[in-house]
Amino acid sequence: MPSASRQILTDGAHRLGLVLERTALERLLAYHAELRKWNRKINLVAQAPELELLETHFLDSLTLLPLLSPAPTLEPLDLLDIGSGAGFPGLVLKCCLPDRLAVTLAEPRQKRVAFLRQVVRTVGLGSGIEVLARRLEPGESGSWPLITSRAFASITDFLNLCGGLSPPGGRVICMKGPRAEEELALWQRQGQAEFFRLEEVRSLSLPFSGAARHLLVFQRH
């Protein structure tokens, strides 16, 4: 199975226009093995064939890599992953860019928190990653230059939450499926552009299933 998983990740990344470094691939495989082991006991992700699991979670998370432009300084880019669940996409991105990203995984469910901390230890990510074991609420303040999530139902709710967490010039990336246009139109109709403006939309397909994905990048005023 490890060799099959390796091939799926390598081929899938290639189809997305990405090349995984050997060390990044080894981290992802160790992460995947830990996920499979824990998923037998607690419901981290839906049970699925190997290819579907790797595509739906790992390769889907990798679609954000091209949006992580090189930092102007040597300081890591601070990324907040809200409602991280089993670590998607934040932990996958950290595995690929351990020195480039400082990642905070916000996850309130304690079993998932235990899993995330175990993966961080097992994979050997060391510094530059924190598991924040609580739910973030609207009105909270913070300063993360990059925020993302796969857990929110609507663009409107997500941006409302991010209003106090994103500094001026910060970016928020919404990861959406086929209903992206509908959600974006609703956000625009509601006139909730007080804090953010839409900067970019990247549309793509997952490498094996062809499922539609849309990455909507917003910038904080």
Image: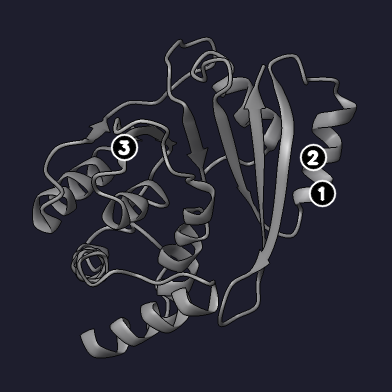
User: Which is nearer the eye, 61 or 221?
Assistant: 221
For the residues marked 1 and 2, what is the alpha-carbon distance in whole angstroms? Answer: 5 Å
Q: For the residue carrying disc 3, how many other residues have a C-alpha within 10 Å: few (<14), some (14-19), or many (20+)?
A: many
Q: Is mark 2 on a helix, strand or loop?
A: helix
- Looking at the image, tell me whether mark 3 or mark 2 is earlier in sequence order: 3
Q: Name the residue under label 3.
A: 103
CB-based contact (under 8 Å), mark 1 and mark 2 = yes
Residue 116: x %, y % from top left: 23, 47
- Of the numbered discs in the image, which one, if any, rests on residue 184? 2
Residue type at tag 2 = Leu
Instruction: List the residue tagged with mark 1.
Output: 181
Q: Which amino acid does label 3 sit on?
A: Val
Q: How crowded is mark 2: few (under 14 residues within 10 Å), some or many (20 or more)?
A: some
Q: Relative to 78, is 124 on the left or the right?
A: left
- Name the amino acid, label 1: Glu
Residue at position x 37%, y 34% from top? 77
Q: Residue at x 70, y 30 (%)?
A: 156
Foreground of the two, 190 or 213: 213
Residue in view at x 54 percent, y 16 percent: 138
Q: In the figure, 215 relative to 204: above or below?
A: above
Quarter holding the C terminus is top right
Where residue 46 sits in the image (x, y, percent)? 42, 66
Which label belongs to residue 203? none
Q: Is residue 150 left or right of residue 96?
A: right
